[in-house]
Image (cartoon, helix red, strand yellow):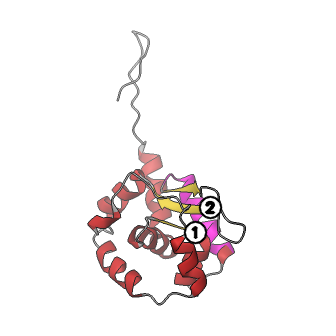
Amino acid sequence: MAQSTEDDEEPTFDTPSDTERIRQMRAVLSETRLGLVQQVLASGSGALSVEELAYRNTDLNERTIDYHLRELADEGVVTRLKADDPANDLPNTYWAVTETGLELLKRLGFYEEIAVLAEADSALTRTTRIKTIENFEGRPEPDWYDTSEL
């Protein structure tokens, strides 16, 4: 969408520059980051906490996962969502893939794998703690994509 400009100026557009797109692609093409993004999309809620991602990625600690999510957020691939009225012992921050992140995965050919990952995610054996987090009524859910289509 073009922005207003002076008569003698070139119009500017609200689209990412090539440099931004390259940075976003590099951020997602890391094997670890790509896996995290895909796992968030494959989850039933469309948003996961660092603790839930650590449970799914036993080779990564929570600090490493948090670092990668923050890097992805800096590039606009994921966004942080706060829980409604979080309980003291439950996570209050969850991560969801943005519309930009969705489009990026589709453009790079990594979106098709989400359905298979969703099946694997639903078959995952969960601890009581993970079940409690997943069933928390105050957990945020993104409204910009439909996880039931997976």
- Say which of 26 and 34 sits in front: 34
Q: Amino acid at mark 1?
A: Ser
Q: Is 70 colored magenta in this rendering?
A: yes
Circles 1 and 2, Cβ within 8 Å, touching? The answer is yes
Q: From mark 1 to mark 2, how far is it between C-alphas? A: 6 Å
In the image, is residue 146 above or below residue 10?
below
- Which of the image's four quarters has the N terminus? top left
Q: Amino acid at mark 2?
A: Thr
Looking at the rendering, the stretch of residues picked out in magenta corresponds to: 63-76
| Residue 75 percent coordinates (x, y) | 52, 53
Secondary structure of residue under mark 2: strand
- Which of the image's four quarters has the C terminus? bottom left
Name the residue tied to disc 1: 49
Residue 81 figure quarter: bottom right
| Residue 84 percent coordinates (x, y) | 60, 55
Secondary structure of residue under mark 1: loop
| Residue 121 percent coordinates (x, y) | 41, 81
- Say which of 37 and 125 sits in front: 125
Name the residue tied to disc 2: 93
Mark 1 crowdedness (10 Å alpha carbons): few <14, some 14-19, many ≥20: many
Q: Residue at x 47, y 75 (%)?
A: 31
Which residue is outermost to the right?
A: 88
Q: Is 142 colored magenta in this rendering?
A: no
Which residue is outermost to the top?
A: 7
Q: Residue at x 30, y 80 (%)?
A: 116
Q: Residue at x 35, y 56 (%)?
A: 145
Mark 1 or mark 2, which has the lower sequence index? 1
